[in-house]
Amino acid sequence: MRGGVFALLHRVLRFCKRHKGGVLIEFTFSIPVCIALLFFVSDHYRFYELKNKLKSSAYLAASLIQQLKNNSATKQLASDDMARIVYASCLNFFHTLTMFRPYPFGIYYLARFYYVKKISNGNYQYQHILITTGKGGNPHPVNAMSCSIGSVETKTPAQVEEIHQDLVCYNSGEERLFIKCWYNNPNVNIYPYNKSKLGLFLLEPKFGEDGNFVYQLVITPKPGLFPVKNE
């Protein structure tokens, strides 16, 4: 048995000696392929990680909205409250003030909120809110946020469903909140973007509201929180 094993090993060694030039050439060509494959796998993991961070940000924003006013006599949220919520929700990826200018990671953070309340079978109370870290210029995080608090409007059920089907309410007085978070590029001519800052090697990410890194969910907010006061 041992003699058979030694004989087999001897044959393998003779084969390697005879074909060592070919093996070396194959190995040389395989190195770039292996490296590219490793970079590709690394990029896919990084994509997953960034998407997961954005998902966590959206759920954190939803949780903060529900809990922020628990110990306050005034339950209605204001523009400053929403700025704090959005700022805090993106700290799982950004740190200190890296979400503001000059954008060290080459991206910034945005969150849209669509609030509806069913008044009657044909009417909804509606408010749109957009808050981003794309303003910057102020050392205080809340003052550095760009806040667009829309006025309260009236919409039809068809208009509400067009925004998101899960915003459609069944009973009068029922409220829904659609939250949409994403990462965006600043002006690349002023703030050059480099994907390596995000740990990417080969894949070219697409940013923006319809890009690769978007997460959305619909919740039922606690009564009295909305509409947001613009003050």
Image (cartoon, grey):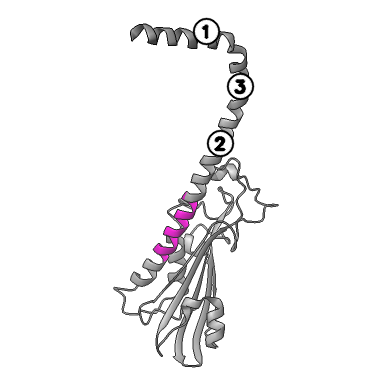
Q: Give the range drawn in magenta.
A: 49-61
**Residue 43 % position (x, y):** 54, 43
**Which callout, 3 or 1, points to the residue nearer the camera?**
1
Amino acid type, label 1: Arg
Q: Is residue 56 highlighted in magenta?
A: yes
Q: Can the viewer see residue 231 in this picture?
A: no
Which residue: 63% across, 19% down? 25
**What residue is disc 3 on?**
26
Q: Residues within 10 Å of mark 2 (few under 14, many from 20)?
A: few
Amino acid type, label 3: Glu
The kind of secondary structure element at disc 2 is helix
In this rendering, is residue 190 above or below 119?
above
Of the pair 186 and 171, the residue shown nearer to us:
171
**Which callout, 3 or 2, points to the residue nearer the camera?**
3
**What residue is disc 1 on?**
14
Q: Which mark is residue 227?
A: none
Q: Give me the C-alpha separation between circle 2 and circle 1.
A: 32 Å
Q: Which mark is residue 37?
A: 2
